[in-house]
Amino acid sequence: MDIRMPGTDGITAPRRIVTNLTTPGCRVIIPTTFDTDEHVFAALRAGASGFLTKEVEPTELRRAVAAVAAGDALLSPGVTRRVIEQFANRQDLTPGAGQRLAALTSRELEAVKLVALGLSTTRSPSASSSARSPPRPTSPGPSPS
């Protein structure tokens, strides 16, 4: 299945195929000349199990079909390298997280870092510093009798 096809494109079609309940276990390999990162990641998100450039040798194509049929996934070597580079260089695994973190004050960001490390913000040395917010008033407890 190619990325650009008449009718249904090669991103929509794999999604429909792999989620179709009448064809359970059906897997898709995309041989294409369009091996941009955008196409690769869109195809993988759509459920493709293989992504090969059309320059692939016939023996490699047979190997890919056998691997995907056995439940594995296979990408062209150049595509694999780019996927690894993209993953290794990713700092923001959650869409929009960078923008949300940028909106935090330095104190809030410090608290988030402490929580991420499994520490309590009330137990950290910096939590007892003078930069801490003043204590909130508490409601009076029961009066002593």
Image (cartoon, rainbow, N blue to C red):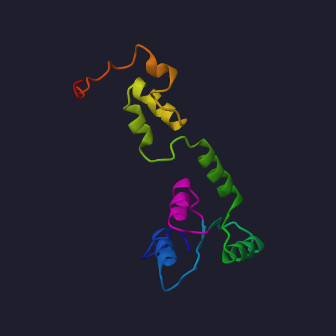
Q: Is residue 90 above or below residue 63?
A: above
Point out residue 56 in the picture as x, y percentages from the top left corner. Answer: 71, 67
Residue pushed farthest top?
130
Q: Is residue 1 above or below residue 128?
A: below
Point out residue 32 in the picture as x, y percentages from the top left corner. Answer: 59, 67
Point out residue 43 in the picture as x, y percentages from the top left corner. Answer: 53, 64
Which quadrant is home to the N terminus? bottom right
Front-most of residues 25 and 125: 125
Which quadrant is home to the C terminus? top left
What residue appears at the point 32 percent right and 18 percent down from the top-left corner?
134
What residue appears at the point 51 percent right and 20 percent down from the top-left corner?
125
What residue appears at the point 65 percent right and 66 percent down from the top-left corner?
52
Point out residue 40 in the picture as x, y percentages from the top left corner. Answer: 56, 59
Q: Is residue 113 above or below residue 127?
A: below
On screen, residue 101 versus residue 124, left or right, reads left
What residue appears at the point 55 percent right and 71 percent down from the top-left corner?
2
Front-most of residues 47 and 35: 47
Q: Quadrant of residue 70?
A: bottom right
Q: Which residues are magenta?
A: 33-49
Q: Is residue 141 above or below residue 69?
A: above
Find out whether residue 39 is within the magenta segment: yes
